[in-house]
Amino acid sequence: MELLIVMAIIAILMLIAIPTVGSLKKHADEISAIQSIRATQQAEMQYESTYPVNGYACTLAALGGDPSAGAPSPTAAQILQGDLTSGFKSGYVFSISNCQKVTVNGTDRITSYTVTAVPQTVGRTGDRGFCSDQFGTIKSDPTGGTNCTQLVQ
């Protein structure tokens, strides 16, 4: 009888703890998304200084690349890790968009970009979406989209 009581108490404690574990995982995914946005910003700055004729990269693939495939290039700069250049990491979907360019001497130079991170499943892998641009300010969208208006501290 005592064993049944102990098992019942353990079961009740587990039922209380399961929602907390899910909440902690979601929070960890959001922190990972913010750090990945920062890593992408740093990679963009390095790309722009390495390839000034091109400006910024307009795809995650251009920031990535396989070191065994040869020397870095503007289409595979080998700056950003492969898990992020795939566009999926820690329950978030990453992309670079809103690229604006100017044409100088027949060459397109990207002068601005927006990097976004949205949850794969809003409410499950994260609650907020995150955005940043070439100026480095990270903002969030509390609905999980890309309409980022709130500053992230």
Image: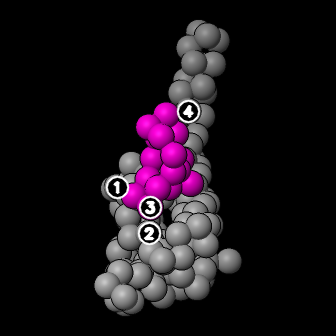
Q: Say which residue label 4 marks.
A: 14
What's the residue at 60%, 80% (across, down)? Answer: 136
Pick whichever, 22 or 145, lies toward us.
145
Q: CA distance from mark 4 to mark 3?
A: 51 Å
Give percent across and percent down for residue 67. 52, 39
Q: Are marks 2 and 3 in contact (CB under 8 Å)?
A: yes
User: Disc 1 residue type?
Assistant: Gln
Q: Which mark is residue 57?
A: 2
Q: Nearer the viewer, mark 4 or mark 3?
A: 3
Magenta segment: 65-81
Q: What is the count of numbered marks?
A: 4
Sequence-first tag of 4 and 3: 4
What kind of residue is marked 3?
A: Pro
Residue at mark 1: 120
Badge 3: how crowded within 10 Å, few (<14), some, or many (20+)? Answer: some
Give the residue type at disc 4: Met
Task: Give the residue number, with chain letter if any, for mark 3.
Answer: 74
Could you tell me which secondary element the residue under label 1 belongs to? Answer: loop
Residue type, mark 2 in image? Ala
Of tags 2 and 3, the one toward the viewer is: 3
Whether residue 139 appears in this view of the structure is no
Asked if the magenta segment contains residue 71, the reply would be yes
Q: Position of residue 22 (x, y in %)?
A: 50, 46
Disc 4 + disc 1, Cβ < 8 Å = no
Lower position in the chain sequence, tag 2 or tag 1: 2
